[in-house]
Image: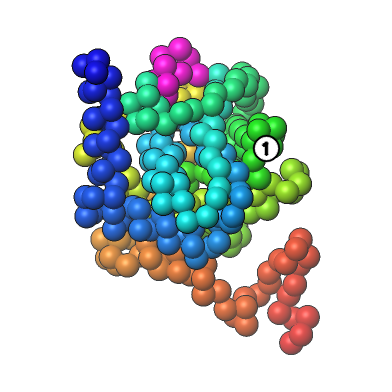
Amino acid sequence: MNKNKYFKENRIRDIEISITKKRRFKEKIFSRFTKAIVEFEMIKPNDKIAVCISGGKDSMLMAKLFQELKRHDKFPFELVFLVMDPGYNEANRKKIEENAETTGVPITVFNTEIFNSVYNVEKNPCYLCARMRRGYLYKKAKELGCNKIALGHHFDDVIETTLMSMLWGGQVQTMMPKLKSKNYEGMELIRPLYYVREDDIKAWRDYNNLTFLQCACRFTEKTESENSESSESKRLETKKIIKELKKSNPNIEANIFNSMKNVCIDAVIAYKKDGESHNFMDEY
């Protein structure tokens, strides 16, 4: 066997073994990944899932977890490892392709011009970019015969989104574990890393000596230099708030998460259901 090929195969095997054989990663990552899938019924027989890879640590780990789940194959389902290039520069595109080869993930890549479309947008460009990305992913996934897309949002994303919605959005809502698409009939979004902590993902990345992309858009570089009030800077600020709160209450993260499972409607002034507003005065 070619020495280079032998090295690559061993590298892939070591990465895969780390997920299921190393105790920390098996308990903190793989077990929590499967817990979310089972609890929220994310996968059903004969699903075809587009595992969406952005180039970051979260989505690449998710791809490896899905590969491991597929090996157990308790019921039939298909996977497509989908990479959307929204306009990466050459170096970032190459980095994604190299990481896919290093980790043994057979990616399907398609191109868009999203970065160019949002570059000159002044109000909420990150939000617009995320919406456009999702739309393109739904469309391509459906073209490939998929009925679900999987995104790599983790536990920390969930609690940060929950807090951001209250502090800056003036509303109470969270990032849901799965959603039915309103614009693409028969399509569904799932978030299998829902219970996985970001620190454990970073630990897995570092254990395997892997490096991934951060946000690779030109807009981020521009706004960082201009000290912009973008949604990404709000997320960083929220991370700092949670970190500070954790100093006095070690359970703060779990409490934020669990608050979305323990909403007391009897103690809420108003709420929305299916787009319709309801007020406690309606039945007082």
Location of the N terminus by quadrant is top left
Q: Is residue 2 left or right of residue 74?
A: left
Above or below residue 141? Residue 6 is above
Q: Amino acid at mark 1?
A: Gly
Residue at the location (21% across, 16% down)? Answer: 3
Q: Is residue 208 left or right of residue 98?
A: left
In this view, which residue lies farthest toward the bottom? 284
For this rendering, which residue is in front, 257 or 44?
44
Asked if residue 41 shows in the view, the reply is yes
| Number of numbered discs visible in the structure rendering | 1
User: Which residue in the structure is indicated by mark 1?
Assistant: 145
In this view, which residue lies farthest toward the front? 1
In this view, which residue lies farthest toward the top? 90
Asked if residue 135 shows in the view, the reply is no
Q: Is residue 92 left or right of residue 26?
A: right
Residue at the location (65% across, 33% down)? Answer: 144
Q: Quadrant of residue 64?
A: top left
Q: Position of residue 111 (x, y in %)?
A: 60, 20
Instruction: Give the residues in magenta.
Output: 88-97
For this rendering, which residue is in front, 235 or 189?
189
Q: Position of residue 239 (x, y in %)?
A: 38, 49
Above or below residue 175? Residue 55 is above
Residue at the location (29% across, 32% down)? Answer: 12
Main secondary structure type of the part rendered in magenta: helix
Q: Position of residue 199 (x, y in %)?
A: 30, 48
Above or below residue 141? Residue 165 is below
For this rendering, which residue is in front, 11 or 260?
11
Q: Secondary structure at mark 1?
A: loop
